[in-house]
Amino acid sequence: MKPLRIAEIFGPTIQGEGALIGEPTVFVRAGGCDYRCSWCDSMHAVDSAYRDAWAPMTTEAIWAEVARLSGGRALTLSISGGNPAIQDFGQLVARARAEGYRTALETQGSVARDWFAGLDMLVLSPKPPSSGEVPDPEALAACIAAGQGAGAMVLKMVIFDAEDYAFARRIAADHPGLPVYLQPGNPETDPDRPVAAQDVADRLLWLVEMVTADGWFGVRVLPQLHVLLWGNQRGV
Amino acid sequence: MKPLRIAEIFGPTIQGEGALIGEPTVFVRAGGCDYRCSWCDSMHAVDSAYRDAWAPMTTEAIWAEVARLSGGRALTLSISGGNPAIQDFGQLVARARAEGYRTALETQGSVARDWFAGLDMLVLSPKPPSSGEVPDPEALAACIAAGQGAGAMVLKMVIFDAEDYAFARRIAADHPGLPVYLQPGNPETDPDRPVAAQDVADRLLWLVEMVTADGWFGVRVLPQLHVLLWGNQRGV
C-alpha cells in the first residue's frame, strides 16, 4: 500500500467541536485537500506548498505513534485534514477498532469511501457559500450512503453569515435523518495570531440568537473549544 | 396537587453544559434546595430568603409558559433548580413528553423519584468536596436505580481542585456504566459581576490538562457555555 501523507499527529487533547466535543482524542491530520476554503484554518494540511512537510507514513507507523501518544490506552482517534477521504485510511480505521479505540473521521463529503462504514463516527461538513467552494450534492449523498454502516453519522456546518445559515437549513432539510451541528466560523486563520476568548463568545452568541430567533430547534450550536483554548496554534 | 415553586422559566436558549450542550432548550428552574453549596451559582433558586420570589404554579401554568416561549415547537425542556427532585415534576414531565418535547432533569442525586424513569435525560451531579456538602452514596444509588427507565442517564461533576477531581474519579469508578461529564467550577457567583471569557478558557484548559495528564479518557470535559456567553446573569 502507498504510504499516507500525514501533516501532524497530536494529542491526547479534547475534541474541540461537534458531536464528540469534550472527548479525549488523538488526532491524525492528513495532508492534502480537494478544496481551498477561503477561511481554511488548516492550510498547512491543505496547500501543496506545505507538501514537503507531510510525512509519508505507513498505517503501522501511524498506529505506533497513536499508541505512543495515548500510552496504549483506548480513546478516540480522530482522522481529519485536509480531506482525509482522498487517501485510504481504511486499514488505520480497522487497526484502531481492533485495538479498542473509537474512530472518527471528518470530511467535507466530497469523496465517498467504502471504509466509512467501519467508523464509529462519520462527520460530514459540507462547506457553505462563504468558503468559496460549491459542494456537489451527489457526492454528499454518496458519502451518506457509504456511511450508513458507521456507528453514527452527523452533519457539521460552519456559519459565517446569513447565506451560510440558509445553506445549512437546506442541507439539513435534504437529509432529515442526520443530527446537525452548527458552529460559528473563525475568521482568524493565521496560526501566529491569538484569538480573543471574547471573540469566540461573541460569535457563538450571534449564532445562538440566530437559531433561537428562527426556531430551528432540531440542531446543536457549539463553539470551537480549541480556538477558545489555543487560538489557531497547531498541534493542540 | 400542591402548586410547584418556580424560580424562573426562560428560553429558548442553548443548553450550556453537559450531555445536551448546545441544544435549544427552555429551562424551568425550581425554587428550593436541600443543599447549600459554597459556590452555588443559583442561590436565587436555593435560599429561602428568595422564597417570596418563587411563583406557586400548577403544572398546567408551567406548561403554558413553556409552550408560549417555544412557540409550541418541540424542543428540550430542562428542569433544574435548586433541586427539582424535592418537588413533584412527574406531571410536567409526562405532559411535555406527550407534546413531543424532550425532557431533561438536573439534580444532585440526593432525592430519588419514580418519575425519573419518564425522562429522556437524567443528569446526576453529585457535589464534590469544595461544595461543602457531603453526598450520601445510598441516595445517589437510589437515584440511579430510579433513573434506569430514563432514555439516558449521566453523571456530571464540577471540578474546582485536585480533591474534587479525586472525588469525581471515585464516583465514576463506583458507577462504571454511566457516561461522565466534567466541568471546571466557576468561582464567581455574583450575578452582577461579569465573568471574563478568558477566565472560562483558563479554567477549562486547567481541567483538560489534568484529565489528559492523568489518562482518564473515558470522560468528557466541557465548559459552561452560558457563563462564557452571559457570565452569571439570570434568565439566559
Image (cartoon, coloured by chain):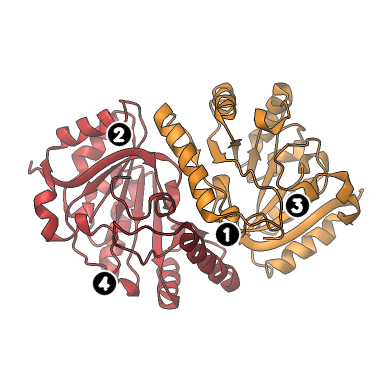
Chain colours: A orange, B red
Q: Nearer the viewer, mark 4 or mark 2?
A: 4
Quadrant holding the C terminus of chain A: bottom right
**SS at circle 4:** loop
Q: Are marks 3 and 4 on the same chain?
A: no
Residue that mark 3 sits on:
A29
- Judge whether B99 appears above or below B36 on screen: above
**SS at circle 1:** helix
Q: Kindly indicate whether the residue at mark 4 contacts the one at mark 1 (C-beta within 8 angstroms).
A: no
On the question of residue A15 being in view, the answer is no
Residue that mark 2 sits on:
B97
Q: Give the quarter of the image for residue B194.
A: bottom left
Residue occupying the point 57% across, 73% down: B214
First in residue order: circle 3 vs circle 1:
3
Q: Nearer the viewer, residue A115 or B92?
A: B92
- Judge whether A64 appears above or below A96 on screen: below
User: Alpha-carbon distance for marks 3 and 1?
Assistant: 19 Å
